[in-house]
Amino acid sequence: MNTSLHNMMLITQNRFYREILGGALKKGLSPGQPKVLELLRHEKECTQTEISRALDLDKSTVTGILSRMESAGLIVVRPDAIDKRRRRISLSPEGLKASDDMEEVFSEVDAIAWGNIPEDRRREFIETLTQIYNNISKAKRYGK
């Protein structure tokens, strides 16, 4: 097996994606929605730009995800009190329920992935992964 960083990141992300998407589909959600649900669960309310930045997704991708979520009744969209051009997005009661459901999926997948890895190695790994993300985000050599 190719254990280079880029290969291990790609194949691990693909495995996580398949596991989480499988759980999301069983709950009636579509791709992209679980990430938005989790973000809004923790942030309570965001603009589309904030969602795009926090999830490192193109604005057009977020537009499609939010449109489907609004149609499904998972989010509430209202004008910003100060800047009427901006829209504030939060979870509806149905969205909060879907978020609860996805938290169970996330917890199950995380528990499987961590397995018997000790807590100190988990923390160290997350710190390292965060630094890798920060490093690659600054580079912007080949991506946007």
Image (spheres, rainbow, N blue to C red):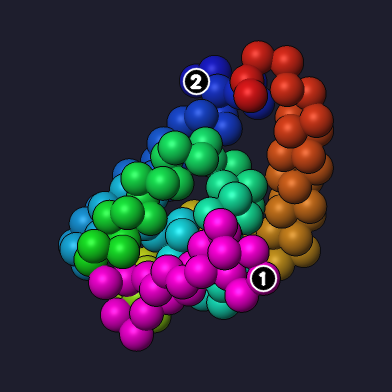
Residue receiving disc 2: 1
**Residue 100, above or below 3:** below
Q: Residue drawn at (57%, 64%), measured in percent from left and top?
A: 84
CA gap, disc 2 and disc 1: 54 Å
**Residue 78, above or below 19:** below
Instruction: Mark 2 vs mark 1: give the one in front.
Output: 1
Q: Position of residue 133 (x, y in %)?
A: 72, 39
Q: Residue drawn at (63%, 24%), measured in percent from left and top?
A: 144
Figure disc tally: 2
Residue 34 in view, yes or no: yes
Is 56 or 49 nearer to us in this picture? 49
Q: Position of residue 132 (x, y in %)?
A: 75, 37
The kind of residue tagged 1 is: Ile
Q: Residue furthest bottom?
A: 93
Residue receiving disc 1: 82
35 to the left or right of 116: left
Span shown in magenta = 73-94
Whether residue 16 appears in magenta in the rendering, the answer is no
Q: Residue drawn at (56%, 57%), measured in percent from left and top?
A: 85
